[in-house]
Image (spheres, grey):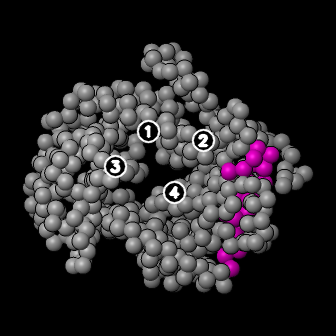
Amino acid sequence: MIRRSSSAALRRVLRSSRVSNISKHHLSTAAAADTNFPPYLLESPTTEITQFPSGLRVASETMLGANTATVGVWIDAGSRYETIHNNGAAHFLEHMAFKGTPRRTQYNLEVEIENMGGHLNAYTSREQTVYFAKVFEKDVPRAMDILADILLRSRLDPGAVERERDVILREMKEVNKQNEELVLDHLHATAFDGSGLGRTILGPEQNIRTLTRDDLREYIDTHYLAPQMVIAGAGAVDHSHLCELADYYFGNLKSELNEEQKKSDAICLDTGKFVGGDVRIHFNSDPIASFALAYEGASWTSEYAYPLMILQTIIGSFDRAVGKNPTSQLCYDVAANELANSISTFNTCYKDTGLFGLYAVAEREKVPALAACITKNIAQLAHHISEEDVERAKISLKATMLMGLDGNTNVCEDIGRQLLTYGRRITPVEIFQRIEEMTVDDVKAAAHKVFYDKDHAMAAVGGIEGMPSYEWLRNNSF
């Protein structure tokens, strides 16, 4: 289903001059043997990567015994690369991609996917745009045909653009009813004020009402470039065949912008700068407060990335509905004193920065005590992390990561995201090795770097009149 035929010409063989840099990423047998990892990890499939001269990359992992495959296109473009004027364009295009092409009407597209028993989906984030399909092995060529058609030849019919405005505005209303989504959007806006990371994915209401077909077409022309795109596949896929399909359907992508496009106001290339800040939206009638307190975290490639993953696991989460089974001193204090309905730790990485913090939901009268509890535990965290805490977190983190790779869709997602993020695929074995190498001192150093004498960002919504001032929170968290 849609959420959100190969031809004779397709049989041509890839010319060797079109392809370069074929590689397989895996940990060497000798290195793997030293880690005492379980056999199923050491025997996991390798990821094959091919880079075309245009910069387009194709990466896949063949999973023996699989009857279905997931193939998709990962694009290194999201809301952070939009401008004030076209913010929301990437998400708007996500809606428009399924509204028809010169070859397929919206109805025909839906019928084709349904008749294949397939699943077509897309999503937009702050840094990436993704379109993918899950299909039977025999339908991989058709899936690639559909993906290329909707990405590169979407009609963007003016009438459909006008109709879709109301759909997106209704989506915005639904998103804003979810306090967690609302809080985290405001958190980004205040944490990265003045930069692309501070803008929402949906864009402001004014942009949704005024973006034109030309704006959307310009976004495609300036961001859907070969070096910014990865064709990923996992499951019942053959790498050489996927390369052939990619060459046929995406071989004419531009490699770079022309001089006029480089000067266009439609391109935003700013760096994500954490500036901190405080935003509070008080509703007198709301008995519940929802807030997020965050500090500058780490980029995907930072030396602190893995220690912060372990730190996130150590701090953990608590949910009153699940029961009192706290995973850290903070969660224990919150549970024992019934300070919150729930509290969770988040660690969000971007290319050049990140956000590390806590999101909490509590009754309005508990907010002052909860804020004091959080800042007290943050201040003491770097000193109280034990060897046992780190070892327990390592086991939990590895289990979470492995469960996140269950199924070819999740593997395909991991391949596409990592190729854009790291330029290569980091295997589970290598990830496990990096986690195992982390020490107590590494995690303490990360906690000290993030929390000690650092400005923070906070966003709070609801019954928050008891929330301490920014200065109080700043001075009591170290």
Q: How many badges with numbers are in the image?
A: 4
Quadrant in which residue 133 is drawn: bottom right
Residue topped by disc 4: 128
Helix, strand or loop for disc 1:
helix
Residue topped by disc 1: 400
Distance between the alpha carbons at the discs numbered 4 and 3: 34 Å
Q: Amino acid at mark 3?
A: Val
Residue topped by disc 2: 407
Q: Amino acid at mark 2?
A: Gly
Quadrant in which residue 36 is drawn: top left
Lower position in the chain sequence, tag 4 or tag 3:
4
Helix, strand or loop for disc 3:
loop
Distance between the alpha carbons at the discs numbered 2 and 3: 27 Å
Q: Is residue 46 magenta?
A: no
Which of 367 and 121 lies nearest the eye of the viewer?
367
Instruction: Please tell me which residue is depicted at 61% across the width and 65% down the height of the picture.
Output: 4
Magenta extent: 134-157
Distance between the alpha carbons at the discs numbered 4 and 1: 23 Å
Q: Amino acid at mark 4?
A: Gln
